[in-house]
Amino acid sequence: MTFPPAPVPPIPIPSRTQYILEAVRHRILTGDLSPGRPLVETELAAQYGVSKTPVREALKTLAGSGLVVMSQYKGATVRTVDAAMAREVYDVRLLLEPEAVRRTVAAGAPPDEAADALVRADTATDTAQRSLANRDFHRALYQACGNPLLVRMLDEVRDQAALVAAAAWSAEPTWEREAAEHRRILRLARAGDAEGAGRALYDHIARFVERAFPGGTEA
C-alpha cells in the first residue's frame, strides 16, 4: 500500500511585529526617519497596512535597543545622535569589546562570520546595509568570548553604535578607512594574535569616535 507524500509545511511568514521592526530600523539607519522625528503609531500602521499593536511592540523593541526614545508626553521619536550619546556608547565598547575579542581569539574561535560580514559591508548598496554589516562583523569577533553576560552587554549597544556610524557617515563617508582597519583586525585574529587583535580593535573604535566627534573618548 502506498501513501501520498506528506504535505510540505508552508514557509513561515515573519510576524507583523518583526516586519515593522526591521522596516523602521532600516529607515532610521538610512536617515529616512531623521533624528528627533515623531513616530506616530497610527501613521506607521497605515503606511504598512497593519494594526497599531505590532507597531507599538516594534517601537518598544527599538526603544530597548536605543534607536527610539519613548516619552509619556511626546510619544516615540527617533533618537538624536550627538557627541555625548556617541561617546557614551563608544566608551562602553572601549571598556568591554577589546577584552571580549582577546578572549574569542585566544579560544581559537573561527572568524568566518566576521569575514562574511566584511564582504557584505563592501558590497552594501546603502548606509543601513553597511552599518548593519559592520555591526555583524564586530559581533562575530566577540560572540565566542566565553562569557554570555559580556556578549549581552555588548549586544545592547549594537544598534546604537550602528546609528552613530550612520550619522557620522552621512556627514563624512569614512567607511573605506574603517573597512581597512577591520581587515587588519581580522588578519590578526586569524593569526591567533589575541593581544594584537584586541589592541587593533581598541584603536579602531577610539579613532572612529575621535574623527566623528572630536574631543571624544581617548585611546
Image: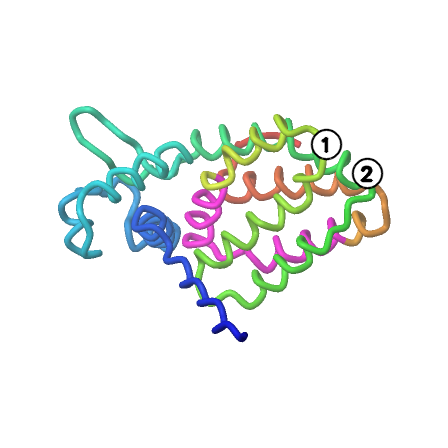
User: CB of mark 2 within 8 Å of CB of mark 1?
Assistant: yes
Residue 80 forms part of the magenta stretch? no
Which sits earlier in the primary sequence, circle 2 or circle 1? Answer: 2
Residue positioned 65% across, 60% down in the render: 116
Determine whether, in the image, residue 10 is placed left or right of residue 153.
left
* Location of residue 47 with respect to 142 vertically, above or below: below
Determine whether, in the image, residue 165 is placed left or right of residue 116.
left
Mark 2 sits on what residue? Answer: 107
Q: Residues in magenta?
A: 161-186
Residue 140 position in % (x across, y down) = 65, 47
* Location of residue 197 with respect to 26 vertically, above or below: above
Mark 2 nearby-residue class (10 Å; few <14, some 14–19, many ≥20): some
Q: Amino acid at mark 2?
A: Ala
Residue 170 forms part of the magenta stretch? yes
Residue 38 position in % (x across, y down) = 20, 41
In this view, the residue in front, 28 or 88, is 28
In this view, the residue in front, 209 or 34, is 34
For the C terminus, give its image quadrant: top right
Residue 44 position in % (x across, y down) = 20, 49
Mark 1 sits on what residue? Answer: 146
Secondary structure of the residue carrying numbered label 1: loop
In this view, the residue in front, 155 or 195, is 155
Assign the magenta stretch its main secondary structure.
helix
